[in-house]
């Protein structure tokens, strides 16, 4: 019996090698950037390929987006979508907008962050839970070309990721909000949860905000990742690694994204669908103001 248990344990240890698995990987997106200079700049200067999601038409968005790009980070558009209550950001797309209005708002937001290779939703509890606007949005992003979409999952009822899949838009979801609670202990706890998810599923993605507490944790912990056997990779790479069918979608995606994602297609299929273990508690929406 003991012998059998040993053999079983050895086989389980070997499993990742047999599957050609790479080390567990995380991606980190810092969003709500562009309103405050010092915090936004600190985010753009974090070590490693942390993605920077910029609010459209915020005072420091052009400057911070350029800095992030110069530091080798993926720049994203942090697209304001209708929150559960109120109007949110001035460029928020509401479900009462006419097709012409929402088209104009989206084009304006995209034009405000020309470096963007990806999009995630700012707020959006209301709009992401509605199928028709999400179908429209993902189709529009697909037509724009060269973008991926990360569902921030501000609501457990979100349809965004599902509609992105339907439209063949490279997509993934946030699994951890690092700083829904800003206490250092809580942020540390979410960080550990992120690493545990990556070890369990192969990949995991977190969203954080440019709070001093969050930035301090990332400045301290990112340099320690390699020693812990965890890779920090850009979201485009995370999406590519999350499965064969996604890789095919990415291969079919046009230009700008293809340039970002270009890499020899020798990946072994490591189909770990992002865990179905979405904590519904994560439905909290960062408070109703556009500023961090
Ligand atoms: Zn936001």
Image (cartoon, rainbow, N blue to C red):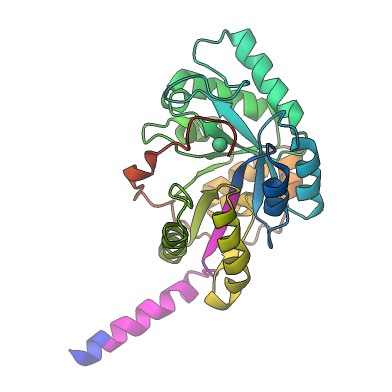
Based on the displayed image, in which of its 4 quarters is residue 89 positioned?
Answer: top right
Quadrant in the picture for the C terminus: top right
> Which of 278 and 45 lies nearest the eye of the viewer?
45
Q: Where in the figure is residue 198, as x and y percent of width and height? A: 47, 62
Q: Is residue 53 left or right of residue 205?
A: right
Q: Ligand 1 shows up in which quadrant of the image?
A: top right
Q: Say which quarter of the image contains residue 284.
A: top left
| Res 137 quadrant in image | top right
Above or below, 57 against 229 in this view is above
| Closest to the observer, 204 or 241 | 204
The answer to whether residue 12 is left or right of residue 255 is left
- Whether residue 248 appears in magenta in the rendering, the answer is no
Describe residue 109's horizontal placement relative to residue 79 as left or right: right
Q: Residue at x 32, y 82 (%)?
A: 9
Is residue 20 shown above or below 50? below
Task: Where is residue 67? Give x, y as percent.
Answer: 80, 48
The front one of 72 and 16 is 72
**Which residue is at 37% across, 31% downward?**
157
Residue at the spot x=44%, y=64% of the render? Answer: 192
**Is 14 part of what is drawn in magenta?**
yes
Q: Quadrant of the N terminus?
A: bottom left
Which residue is most to the bottom? Answer: 3
* Residue 45 to residue 225: above or below: above
* Region in magenta: 6-29
Q: Position of residue 105 (x, y in %)?
A: 66, 18
125 relative to 253 in the view: left or right = left
Residue occupying the point 68% across, 36% down: 35
Task: State whether residue 74 appears in this view.
Answer: no
How far from the left and from the top, in percent, is residue 132? 47, 18
Viewer-side residue, 162 vs 37 = 37
């Amino acid at each position: 019996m003991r012998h059998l248990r040993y053999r079983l344990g050895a086989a389980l240890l070997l499993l990742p090698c047999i599957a050609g698995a790479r080390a567990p990987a995380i991606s980190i997106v810092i969003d709500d950037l562009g309103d405050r200079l010092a915090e936004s700049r600190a985010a753009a200067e974090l070590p490693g390929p942390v993605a920077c999601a910029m609010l459209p038409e915020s005072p420091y968005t052009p400057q911070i987006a350029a800095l992030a790009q110069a530091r080798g980070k993926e720049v994203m558009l942090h697209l304001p979508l209708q929150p559960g209550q109120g109007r949110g950001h001035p460029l928020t797309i509401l479900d009462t907008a006419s097709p012409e209005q929402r088209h104009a708002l989206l084009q304006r937001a995209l034009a405000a962050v020309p470096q963007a290779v990806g999009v995630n939703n700012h707020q959006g509890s209301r709009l992401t839970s509605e199928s028709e606007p999400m179908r429209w949005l993902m189709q529009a992003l697909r037509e724009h070309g060269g973008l991926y979409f990360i569902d921030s999952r501000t609501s457990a009822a979100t349809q965004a990721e599902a509609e992105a899949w339907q439209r063949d838009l490279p997509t993934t979801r946030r699994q951890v909000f690092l700083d829904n609670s800003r206490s250092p202990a809580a942020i540390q706890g979410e960080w550990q949860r992120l690493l545990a998810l990556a070890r369990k599923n192969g990949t995991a993605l977190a969203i954080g905000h440019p709070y001093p507490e969050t930035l301090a944790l990332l400045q301290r912990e990112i340099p320690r990742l390699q020693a812990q056997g965890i890779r920090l990779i850009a979201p485009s790479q995370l999406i590519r690694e999350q499965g064969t069918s996604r890789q095919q979608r990415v291969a079919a995606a046009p230009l700008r994204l293809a340039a970002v994602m270009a890499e020899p297609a020798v990946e072994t299929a490591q189909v770990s669908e992002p865990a179905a273990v979405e904590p519904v508690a994560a439905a909290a929406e960062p408070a109703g103001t556009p500023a961090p």
